[in-house]
Amino acid sequence: MGKVVIIGGGPAGMIAGIAAARSGQKVVLFEKNEKLGKKLFITGKGRCNLTNAADMQELMKQVVSNPRFLYSAFHLFDNGKTMEFFEELGLPLKTERGNRVFPQSDHSSDVIKVLQRELERLGVAVCLNTEVVDIKQQDGKFYSVCFGKKREEMKADACIIATGGLSYPSTGSTGDGYRFAKALGHTATPLFPSLVALETEEEFVKNLQGLSLKNVGIQLVRDGKLLHSDFGEMLFTHFGVSGPLILSASSYVAAELQKGAVLPKLQIDLKPALTREQLDVRILRDFEAAGKKQYKNSLEHLLPQRLIEVIVELSGIPSDKKVNEISKEERKQLVSLLKCLTLCIKKPRGYDEAVITKGGVCVKEIQPATMESKLIKGIYFAGEVLDLDAMTGGYNLQIAWSTGYAAGSSQY
């Protein structure tokens, strides 16, 4: 029986502990917080979207950074095995829109409870309120960890670093794993907040704060080149834009920041179901029905009330102009605006609002089948600390379960 030390009691750390203990290892798990799964508790607005029931092709498609690295880990412990794992632990699951998987109870605390119970059953020693401050290696092999204010030392055969990223630092994600990785000779790629709201330049967004738009299309475009497109729901805020569409788009914005590129513009198609020609016909019909109404009073069947004032101003058509006096050219301007409302992105919001961290320990330095370091024998990485990230919908937690399980079930 070997001895395995795990640093971090989030999803990757907990499942690594279970996998290692099930394979006969003696496991000690260090968590600097007062309880396990602190960030897991707030995921999915407290409901915990723990995976996605999509097929493997879709699963891989939703991984943004280094998807090919995950082939082995996903093959070993995919979303189907994740669902079986939790149901065997006594957690009934349900699948909702977009194949998102949740506990039937809608309580993330139930996910944490079944993991804790299994750790206890397997005899995993969980050390809460205990921070690992240093990792020692000798001759290219893991040797020990130092923990606590007194820097007590614990020797072991292997160490799994599952410390998370930088997002939601109040939950303990303060970048410890990157510090450990660098001290051990590893490279950390540039880090950015991701799956996060975006700040925009335009002042008019403040007037739209709280307005939610469903069934809109978005594109990220730079110098005429399309970087990303999507369809769904978004929300205006006092600083810019948010909502599911925007969180996903932010992953591509962060990727551009990683490259040091100029940020793309966000183009919103307010009427994606209609072509420009169809929209023009629709507007003409509305104008004809409105008769001698003023332009500002003619769009109530086309747009939400709060958006009308902004669109009227941006269109450049005088607000008090009678609709039967609006020219074909002016109508074309309105069509172009509705099909391509353009916002200039300033930056993503900070880590305290970001769902995940983009960037992390370079996966070229990690064995994809086991998550073991290629540089230091006996050192493993799992979860968000790695340079892996995906879209919203349970995919990032699946990365944590798969990499955590691969690290925990390795032969030490």
Image: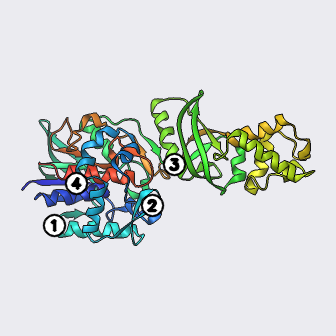
Residue 89 in the image: above or below residue 406: below
Real-space Cα separation, disc 4 to disc 3, in angstroms: 31 Å
- Residue 132 visible (yes or no): yes
Considering the numbered disc 4 on the image, is that residue within a helix, a strand or a loop?
strand
Give 364 or 132, whichever is nearer the viewer: 364
Q: Which residue is mark 4?
A: 6
* Residue pictured at 87% horizontal, 46% vertical: 319
Marker disc for residue 123: 1
Query: Badge 3: how crowded within 10 Å, few (<14), some, or many (20+)?
Result: many
Which image quarter holds the N terminus?
Answer: bottom left
Q: Which residue is mark 2?
A: 44
Q: Specify the quadrant of the image occupied by residue 112.
A: bottom left
Image check: 200 left or right of 314?
left
Query: Badge 1: how crowded within 10 Å, few (<14), some, or many (20+)?
Result: some
Do residues under tags 1 and 2 come within 8 Å of each other at their CB atoms? no
Q: Looking at the image, is mark 3 or mark 2 earlier in the sequence?
A: 2
Q: Looking at the image, is mark 4 or mark 1 earlier in the sequence?
A: 4
Q: Looking at the image, is mark 4 or mark 3 earlier in the sequence?
A: 4
Q: Farthest residue in the left direction?
A: 1
| Image coords of residue 224 (percent x, y) | 60, 28
* Residue pictured at 31% horizontal, 70% vertical: 91
Real-space Cα separation, disc 3 to disc 2, in angstroms: 13 Å
Considering the numbered disc 1 on the image, is that residue within a helix, a strand or a loop?
loop
Q: Amino acid at mark 4?
A: Ile
Camera-near label (4 vs 3) is 3
Camera-near label (3 vs 1) is 3
Marker disc for residue 247: 3
